[in-house]
Amino acid sequence: MERLRSEVKIKLALVVKPVDVVTGLAPAAVPRLVVEGVPCRPVRKPDGTFLLLGLPPGIYSIALSAPPHYADSRAVVDTAALSPLEPVELVPMLPTSSYPFAPGTTLIRARAKGVPEGAVILRAAVMDGNLACAKLHQEADKGETELAFGAVHRLVSGRCYYVLDPDPAKREVIRVVALEEANRKAKLQTPFRFAHRKGTVLTDVAEGAADGRGEWAAAFPPQGVKRFFCAVQLFMSADEPLILDQEVQVEEGQPVQLGLLPSTDE
């Protein structure tokens, strides 16, 4: 009993929340969590989050792995910058081509040679403003991390969304980490890079990571239309376009094969 009491008093330092970007839920497979350079034994809760106790304030590199359906995920966390009451760090888990996508899922598939596993990300964003997931209820300043929405059709915590700004130079991808007030308010993982006016549309984004064979698969949720266009990019973790940047027409419920892409060394 004394041992239990002493463990309960240990301060909660960090909550790591893995999220399957396809479903917005905890990954179907239990990830392996490693805090690089720090021996620790995380406690996994039934909701899929990991509790890290007793870590002194600092900057930590964490890694999550759950092969073969997910690519390895990494994040650098400054515990001093987190809320002491809710020190939560969301870590997205991107699907590989072997992920068990549901039948009828709208997929973008691609292949390339010479791609390190998990090193390159496929991201496709819906380009049709009529397929909005939400609209900004008010102007959003550069650096904003909390957003209010007017019309909300579908938003899922953990997923990315495309800010379809009327100015193409200001379009960007954001990741929602928390939803509040009946999904009419959202917190972002990183601040807006640009300011956006009231009424700006957010659309769906599909993500996938390369597997060991240099293959990607990224899935869209249902859009409710027969066909739509999306902007497809391959990029490194720094969001730098790498070997692909093009617009593709997608047919709802059907996979799109982009074929064999150039090598990342070319």
Image (cartoon, grey):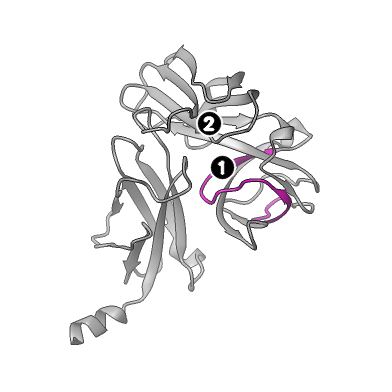
| 250 in relation to 59, above or below | above
Residue in the picture at 38% in, 43% down: 73
In 3D space, how far apart are the residues under numbered discs 1 and 2 (Cα atoms)? 9 Å
Q: Residue at x 34, y 40 (%)?
A: 72
From the viewer's side, name the closer residue of 74 and 102.
102
Instruction: Report the side of 113 relative to 232 (left or right).
Output: left
Q: Which residue is under mark 1?
A: 160
Image quadrant containing the C terminus: top left
Residue 127 rendering spot, x and y as whole percentages: 68, 29
The local secondary structure at tag 1 comes to: strand
Asked if residue 180 lies left or right of residue 264, the reply is right
- In x, y percent, where is residue 112? 41, 17
Does 252 appear above or below 50? above
User: Which residue is rendered at x = 40% and y = 51% of the image?
Assistant: 26
Amino acid found under the numbered disc labelled 2: Arg
> Which numbered marker is on residue 123?
2
Residue 8 drawn at (x, y percent): 30, 80
Left-right relation of 242 to 70: right
| Disc on the earlier residue, 1 or 2 | 2
Location of residue 206 with respect to 158 vertically, above or below = above
Marking on residue 168 = none
Q: Give neighbour class at mark 1: few <14, some 14-19, many 20+ (Cα, 10 Å).
A: many
- Which amino acid lies under the numbered mark 1 shown in the image of this protein? Cys
On whether residue 148 falls in the magenta region, the answer is yes
Nearer to the camera, 28 or 7: 28
Q: Bounds of the magenta span?
A: 142-163
Mark 2, secondary structure of its residue: strand
User: What's the residue at 48%, 16% (across, down)?
Assistant: 257
Alpha-carbon neighbours of circle 2 within 10 Å: few (<14), some, or many (≥20)? many
- Does the CB distance between marks 1 and 2 fall below 8 Å? yes
